[in-house]
Image (cartoon, rainbow, N blue to C red):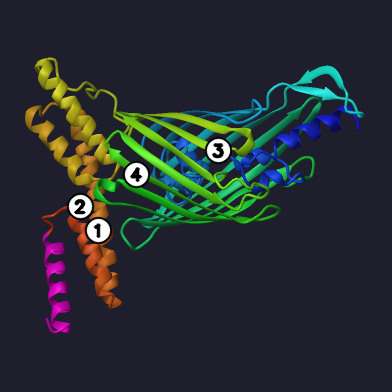
Amino acid sequence: MNQRTAALAVLIALLTLPASTAWSQTSQAGSILTIGPGAQAGAMAESFAALATGTFGSAYNPAGLARAQGVAFGFQHQEWAQDIRLDYLTVMLPLGPGHMQGAVQLVNYGLLDVYTETGLRTGDTFSPYDLSLHGAYGLKLAPEWNVGGGFTLNQTLIRDYRDTGLAAHLGVLWQAPWPGFTAAAVFKNLGGAASGYAFPMRGVLAAGYTGLEENALSANLELDLPLGLGGVEAAVGVEYRLVQVLSLRLGYRLGAQGHDDPLFGLSTGLGVAWRNLDFSYALRPLGDFGFSHQVSLSYTVSSLAEPSGVETGAASASVKPEVREAVEKRFLAGKYYYRKKNYKKAIAEWELIREFNPDHQKSKIFLERARKEMEAERQRLYQLAEEANSRGEFKREILYWQEVLKLDPDDPRAKENVWMEIKDSQEENGD
């Protein structure tokens, strides 16, 4: 065994750390690609394909970029066992009808000793690493359909051994006809390295739900299938927002081979959102290797690009400081509701600002956009309700009209149809 082979053997041993079943396959390249970035998804056992939100969401489904808003930056740092560290830097911005993302990831495996073919240390050391460049783009094809694609250029360096490969990623995200439900299909790591080894290619089928009051609950259930080597995995992740700034997360992944610890697939964490900043932390047990700690930070510059020449302050100089502060709080509250697609509350916040300070241009811009998006959503639900009625699915039709009433409790068309459908249903049942 020469020094290069010994170095590869050491790295392969490191890659048997429990990230997923694919890590235990030594005839694959780029096993590090099985680890997704972002502590939000990490705390949910990386079960995220049907949610795919936030700065790191496109790594789990590039179609999620179609739902992005504005410009955002993200950074994560992850500590694995044996001094393995993973750092990820990304930027997301609007481009044409959709959004694009670019990212760079560096995995450093620490300082390793070199051994001879007889197992003796030579006194030399080396520091292997993986460097990956990512790009992705997503857009909305129809009101219910989002699509996206991306690529990863990965390079592995182990002493004097270098291997480069290119992988493709494809994703679809579907807004189901049932309020709050989504479904997704993703193909990940389609490609291989120059060495001739394939990447850990996977196919993911997922279902997600976002709902309850102000969309406080998010959940994702997915099936992770091998397209080459590896085993079948299943994962579930749940997030619950306790208050406006604090969310708790929990996840579990089944299917990892060679690990007897029942806690191995467990993950947990929390998120703190303050204004345009989002901080997340994830903790995952690694059996005999201890714990993995993952932190990520993302910053959204704006959920709407503002035209040049528009006043960007909270209020004009003539407004009293205490009023200016109150206006800024209202404006940020409106942006929070807007990002959660709670248009009714967002519009209420910005309309209140306009009453106190008609010259506040940012609230005017955001108010106009929220009204347009709310109306587009209203028309989408109208169409779904009418289609359900034509198919005779009256209970489902009522659900759509109720979703309209969540957007606007005073919507006359929805109020009339809900009342009529309930009345007809009662007559059919003899009530």
Q: Which mark is residue 285?
A: 3
The answer to the question of whether label 2 and label 4 lie on touching residues, with beta carbons closer than 8 A, is no
Q: Secondary structure at mark 2?
A: helix
Task: Examine the rendered structure and indicate whether residue 376 appears above or below residue 398.
Answer: above
Outermost left residue:
355
Q: Which mark is residue 71?
A: none
The answer to the question of whether label 4 and label 3 lie on touching residues, with beta carbons closer than 8 A, is no
Task: Examine the rendered structure and indicate whether residue 280 appears above or below residue 409.
Answer: above
Label 2 or label 1, whichever lies nearer to me, is: 2
By secondary structure, the bulk of the magenta-drawn segment is best described as helix
Residue at horizontal 16 percent and vertical 36 percent from the top: 349
Q: Give coordinates of residue 23: x percent, y percent.
A: 68, 43
Residue at horizontal 18 percent and vertical 42 percent from the top: 345
Task: Examine the rendered structure and indicate whether residue 360 appears above or below residue 418.
Answer: above
Q: Quadrant of residue 225?
A: bottom right
For marks 2 and 1, the one nearer the N-term is 1
Whole-angstrom CA distance, mark 2 to mark 1, is: 11 Å
Q: Is residue 107 left or right of residue 321?
A: right
Q: Nearer the viewer, residue 3 or 118?
A: 118
Q: Give coordinates of residue 289: x percent, y percent.
A: 63, 34
For marks 4 and 1, the one nearer the N-term is 4
Whole-angstrom CA distance, mark 3 to mark 2, is: 42 Å
Instruction: Provide the residue span drawn in magenta.
Output: 412-431
Task: Examine the rendered structure and indicate whether residue 421 appears above or below residue 315.
Answer: below
Whole-angstrom CA distance, mark 4 to mark 3, is: 21 Å
Q: As shown in the figure, which amino acid type bears the numbered disc 1?
A: Gln
For marks 3 and 2, the one nearer the N-term is 3
Q: Which residue is mark 2?
A: 407
Q: Quadrant of residue 32?
A: top right
Q: As shown in the figure, which amino acid type bears the numbered disc 3?
A: Pro
Q: Which mark is residue 240?
A: 4
For marks 4 and 3, the one nearer the N-term is 4
